[in-house]
Amino acid sequence: MKAIILCGGLGTRLREETEYRPKPMVEIGGRPILWHILKYYARFDVRDFVLCLGYKGQMIKEYFLNYEAMNSDFTISLGRLSAISYHAEHAEQDFRVTLADTGANTMTGGRLARVRRHVGNERVLVTYGDGLTDLDLDAALRFHEAHGRLATVATVRPTSRFGVLDVNDNGTVETFAEKPILNGWVSAGYFIFEPEVFDLLDTSESCILEREPLERLAAEGELMAYQHDGFFFAMDTFREYQQLNEIWESGTAPWANPRNSRTLGTGHTPTQRLRPIAPSLMKAAS
């Protein structure tokens, strides 16, 4: 099974970093967040990837073209007998990465449609290049296979950006909660798609996965929500970039060992069907 990763967005809310590099190349613990996402999938034996490139995509190509040299000791012979010998092996020996230029301004649906030729007629995993999770992917796949619909999206409960107050009629604050977890569910951006989903997409720059295609799937009862009560963190701002680095430096990053996360196997309601999600809570270009 292949995993498609949307790597082409501008990342404008993280301009401190993305002015110089694409968001998937912003580093968490000295490694691009894209590397962390690939390693997450590999822990569930998914090692075949298709990257949808756009903004500064050449930097991602250069990263993988130089991966062997930058992650191994090597001996190089210069001159007419030019050759390189790599010593030992890094942990990504069996990774297969397809890098596809899907256009500088193409939206998410168009990017997916443009890489269809690289995935063939098979089930695929899809995510964005800026979110980390300890989602139990094996359990999500079992859920997907059991319901028999065309698409599954992992959902999480959102956390308020602000303190929430319960105020009575005379203005007295009865309770105060700093950034509580809110009711309801939003997309975590980790998808499982059957090949028929590609029939709802087109290769135009304006095709947005999170609008008509997902809205149509939901309206037709073909989109199911796998409810994840564990860790999910999207890196949209500089503060979130700092927080992810702090989590990594603590040595307790949940996405680094999702199989052992204490959150696995809890809180999932496999019969819940996804309701249409407000566009403000979904990504439009990534």
Image (cartoon, rainbow, N blue to C red):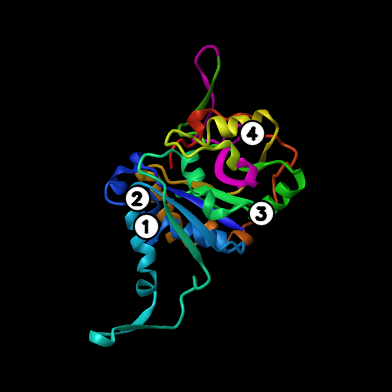
Mark 2–mark 3 distance (CA, rounded to whole Å): 31 Å
Task: State yes or no: discs 4 and 2 in contact (Cβ < 8 Å).
Answer: no
Q: Residue at x 50, y 45 (%)?
A: 112
Residue 121 shows in the view: yes
Q: Are marks 4 and 1 in contact (CB under 8 Å)?
A: no
Compute the Cα span from label 3 to label 1. Answer: 32 Å
- Kind of residue indicated by mark 1: Ile
Q: Which residue is mark 3?
A: 264
User: Label 3, label 4: how many angstroms apart (C-alpha)?
Assistant: 27 Å
Q: CA distance from mark 4 to mark 1?
A: 32 Å
Instruction: Looking at this view, name the residue that lies furthest to the left.
Output: 79
Residue 178: say if magenta. yes
Q: Position of residue 225 (x, y in %)?
A: 66, 39
Three-letter residue code for mark 4? Leu
Q: Nearer the viewer, mark 4 or mark 2?
A: 4
Reading the image, the residue beneath label 4 is 217
Q: Which residue is mark 2?
A: 22
Q: Are marks 2 and 1 in contact (CB under 8 Å)?
A: yes
Residue interval drawn in magenta: 169-197
Of labels 3 and 4, earlier in sequence is 4
105 in relation to 79, above or below: above
